[in-house]
Image (cartoon, rainbow, N blue to C red):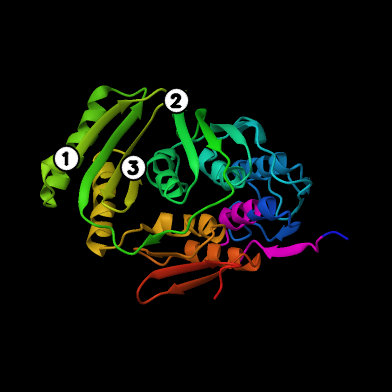
């Protein structure tokens, strides 16, 4: 007799695509059939958008799942894994999910399939086409400089190649990820961040005058200097990047002895540098080792590790609380979040004392 269908309310907590993505990853890893309902029902456009639909189909393809409800706008999906995760070469195009294409985020599709493939025995390559640096999702640069290094510290062997940038609304960006499967993930303790060693600043634009890139870079340099950071700490990089369409953005990565935090802005004009520098400064003043975005992204690898993970996050967000709820719904770990100290503890099942 097969496993009982696990019912998951997609409107819980933050109520966005994160419930869907985490549930798909864990269903794929555990073989647990799931039914997600009320998917994104609180959003302006409820149900599956192009990136969510691509994530469903991507997860299904790596474990031979049977799926119902995988259409645009669907608020209910039934997902039944057909096998263990199958390592291999995969390619997903978010634009194929919607007539006229889409700039749906490739990072969110990647996060759905990355860990299932990372803990499978065997090597995989994943190519994803879509939006690489778009609103309301982690930019691929954040995945490259923050998320993947954190995963490597937990034993995940993965490399990412950003081949073309995809801006909103055109998309068309391309990433290729190489994953060496390894069944054992380590826990991680990030309770102190250590000294600030580098502030990596990336000013990027496509199909726009070079002076726009230089202006963003100069503005960030001036602002960081005004905040009191030594110029020797600041590593400025200006990129006129390959892309099907025009776009711009600024990305800052604060590299400390024990952790890295990331910040981004896709705003226009002088606002772009002001936004991203202010965000970085707020985090720096918090003294925390883990930024609010990595705070919820670490939950999934932590629940799959062989030992406890502990970290202090700059903010306890609804995303974090929601992801913790999904992990506990699958019974994979005990997650404790102390709102006073902002300390998060994840004890995987089987390691309870």
The residue at the point 57 percent across, 34 percent down is 102
- Residue 13 visible within the image: no
In this image, 141 relative to 85: left or right? left
On the image, the x and y values in percent for residue 292 come to 39, 59
Q: CA distance from mark 2 to mark 3?
A: 16 Å
* Mark sitting earlier along the chain (2/3): 2
Question: Does residue 84 sit above or below 352 in this rendering?
Answer: above
* Numbered circle sitting on residue 196: none
Of marks 3 and 1, the one in the foreground: 1
Q: CA distance from mark 3 to mark 1?
A: 17 Å
In the rendered image, residue 115 lying in the magenta stretch gets the answer: no
Residue 103 or residue 34, whichever sits in front: 34
Tag count:
3
> For the residue labelled by badge 1, is the local secondary structure a helix, a strand or a loop?
helix
* Numbered circle sitting on residue 245: 2
The residue at the point 58 percent across, 53 percent down is 17
Residue 302 or residue 147, whichever sits in front: 302
Q: CA distance from mark 2 to mark 1?
A: 27 Å
* Numbered circle sitting on residue 267: 3
On the image, the x and y values in percent for residue 148 come to 44, 44
On the image, the x and y values in percent for residue 49 come to 62, 45
Task: Tell me the quadrant of the picture where the C terminus can be found.
Answer: bottom right
* Mark sitting earlier along the chain (2/1): 1
Residue denoted by label 1: 221
> For the residue labelled by badge 3, is the local secondary structure a helix, a strand or a loop?
loop
In the rendered image, residue 14 lying in the magenta stretch gets the answer: yes
Residue 32 or residue 6, whichever sits in front: 32
**Range of magenta residues:** 3-25
Q: Answer whether labels 2 and 3 touch (C-beta < 8 Å).
A: no
Of marks 2 and 1, the one in the foreground: 1
């Amino acid at each position: 007799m097969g496993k009982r269908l696990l019912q998951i309310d997609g409107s819980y907590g933050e109520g966005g695509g994160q419930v869907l993505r985490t549930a798909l990853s864990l269903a794929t890893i555990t073989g647990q059939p799931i039914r997600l309902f009320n998917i994104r029902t609180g959003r302006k456009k409820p149900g599956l958008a192009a990136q969510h639909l691509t994530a469903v189909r991507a997860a299904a393809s790596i474990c031979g799942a049977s799926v119902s409800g995988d259409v645009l706008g669907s608020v209910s999906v039934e997902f039944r894994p057909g096998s263990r995760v199958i390592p291999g070469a995969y390619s997903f195009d978010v634009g194929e999910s919607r007539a006229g294409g889409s700039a749906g985020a490739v990072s969110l599709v990647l996060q759905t399939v990355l860990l299932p493939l990372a803990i499978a025995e065997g090597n995989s390559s994943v190519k994803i086409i879509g939006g690489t640096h778009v609103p309301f999702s982690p930019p691929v640069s954040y995945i490259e400089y923050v998320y993947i290094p954190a995963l490597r510290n937990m034993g995940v062997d993965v490399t990412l190649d950003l081949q073309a940038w995809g801006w909103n609304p055109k998309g068309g960006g391309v990433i290729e990820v190489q994953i060496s499967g390894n069944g054992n993930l380590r826990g991680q303790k990030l309770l102190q961040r250590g000294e600030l060693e580098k502030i990596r600043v990336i000013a990027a634009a496509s199909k726009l005058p070079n002076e726009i890139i230089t202006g963003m870079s100069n503005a960030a340099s001036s602002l960081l200097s005004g905040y009191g950071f030594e110029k020797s700490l600041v590593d400025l990089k200006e990129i006129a990047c390959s892309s099907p369409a025009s776009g711009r953005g600024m990305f800052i990565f604060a590299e400390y002895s024990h952790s890295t935090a990331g910040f981004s802005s896709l705003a226009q004009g002088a606002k772009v540098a002001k936004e991203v520098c202010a965000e970085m400064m707020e985090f720096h003043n918090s003294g925390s080792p883990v930024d609010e975005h990595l705070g919820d992204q670490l939950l999934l690898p932590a629940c799959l590790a062989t030992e406890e993970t502990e970290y202090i996050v700059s903010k306890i967000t609804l995303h974090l609380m929601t992801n913790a709820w999904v992990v506990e719904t699958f019974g994979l770990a005990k997650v404790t979040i102390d709102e006073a100290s902002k300390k998060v503890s994840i004890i995987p099942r089987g390691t309870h004392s």
